Amino acid sequence: MRLLGVDPGSRHTGIGIVDAEGARIIHVHHEVIHTGNGTLTQRLHILFRRLQTVIATYQPASAGMEDVFVAKNAASALKLGQARGALIAACADAGLEVSAYSPTTVKQAVVGFGRADKVQIQHMVQMLLNPSLKPAEDAADALAVAICHAHHSRMQTIADTPRTKRPVLRRWLSGTVRQLDPTGIIVLDTGGVGYEVLLSLQTLCGLQQNQQAELFIHTHVREDQITLFGFATPKERALFRRLTTVSGIGARLGLNLMSGMPVEELTRAIDHGDDGAIARTPGIGKKTAQRLILELRGKLDSDDLAGTAKPADANAEDVRSALINLGYKPAQIDPALKQAGAHADFESMFRAVLKALG
């Protein structure tokens, strides 16, 4: 599926086009539309006509566009809004649906961190699409929007696919440990299929090669890969999911935290505000440890982590985790989960929550 990404601007507008083939995303085209120093009417006309030409040339199926929240002043904000309107009109004229994404959502989807700067975005766009690419700043931002749109479109396709045809999100695996890497990666043989699973060092220490193992699985979905994280108990998995809701803590950093100390010690350090103990984890600085404490202190109820607080809705945490991977914030997700109510399976709940999110 071919997708268009647009980073709007009244003088410089980034355009990026990619092909999404399952989890693989391929670069097709990028450019920056420079509107020059003409009148606003002339600049808007240039934007409209050039985007029309790009759409006619590359025939994308749909478009993603970055929402604009910040401008230098009211006049700049108005001009930017008018530019965005001209670009949306060009898409509508070609029959394209336009999805809007906040800058934070785009950064989360591409870099994994909602406060990433433009240098980080450019670097990740190159790594995800083609290391030899050298897109200008505006074009890199547009390609990032296209990547974000591809990721969201894929998850929406999963939600809209009949249940019998959907990929399975693994929640639990049992089998024989065929390979064991001391860095925390194992290959688990389940019914003749080898699953690569990433583990905390705490979980890894309890396993032996060629021995049976049972793991509770968290499936982490990114635009370029699906990664399985394994845990010895539901409580460990629940804590990991809570850790990764904190701004600046992705899945790998969350796993590092789980490796540094047992669940009980980590929970106690958070509740007691022991940022020194938390900051000893590789990759975790003092500020990140303090933010972790600020966001989670008093919220790590032992029954909830054990998985007993919501027995009627065991899919809620899986849905919550999937949406966080998509760039949604807990403040957006929790009301939508409440509005969606209980569902018998992950897929129906995921669809209901997406609908509630609008």
Image (cartoon, grey):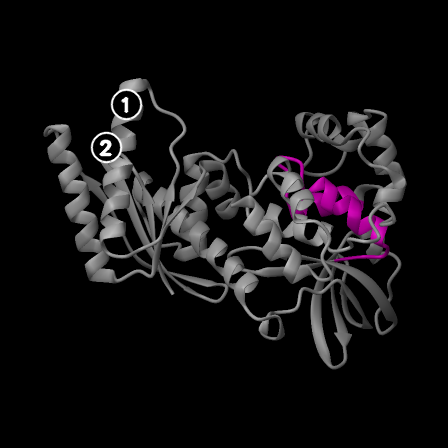
Q: Is residue 352 left or right of residue 17?
A: right
The boundaries of the magenta stretch are 230-259
The count of marks equals 2
Residue sitting at x 85%, y 67% = 213
Q: Viewer-proximal residue, 35 or 225?
A: 35
Decide: few, some or many residues near mark 2? Use Cα within 10 Å; few <14, some 14-19, many ≥20. many
Identity of the residue drawn at 45% across and 38% down: 102
Query: Mark 1 and 2 residues: CB-CB less than 8 Å, in contact?
Result: yes
Crowd class of label 1 (few under 14; some 14 to 19; many from 20; radius 10 Å): some
Query: Is residue 250 found inside the magenta-colored segment of the image?
Result: yes
User: Residue 246, position in %: x, y?
Assistant: 67, 36
Figure quadrant of the N terminus? bottom left
Dot 2: element = loop
- Left/right of residue 67 with respect to residue 183 in the rendered view: left
Q: Which is nearer the eye, 295 or 181?
A: 295
Which of 129 and 272 lies nearest the eye of the viewer?
272
SS at mark 1 in the image = helix
Q: CA distance from mark 1 to mark 2?
A: 9 Å
Q: What amino acid is found at the position of numbered circle 2 in the picture?
A: Ser
Residue drawn at point x = 59 percent, y = 57 percent: 351
Q: Is residue 184 left or right of residue 263?
A: left
Percent x, y of residue 160: 53, 64
Amino acid type at image mark 1: Ser
- Mark 1 lies on residue: 76
Identify the residue position indicated by label 2 in the image: 10
Prevailing secondary structure class for the magenta stretch in the rendered image? helix
Specify the farthest residue to the top: 73
Disc nearer the start of the sequence (1/2): 2
Residue 143 at what x, y percent from top left?
36, 49
Residue 172, x across and y down, in percent: 78, 64
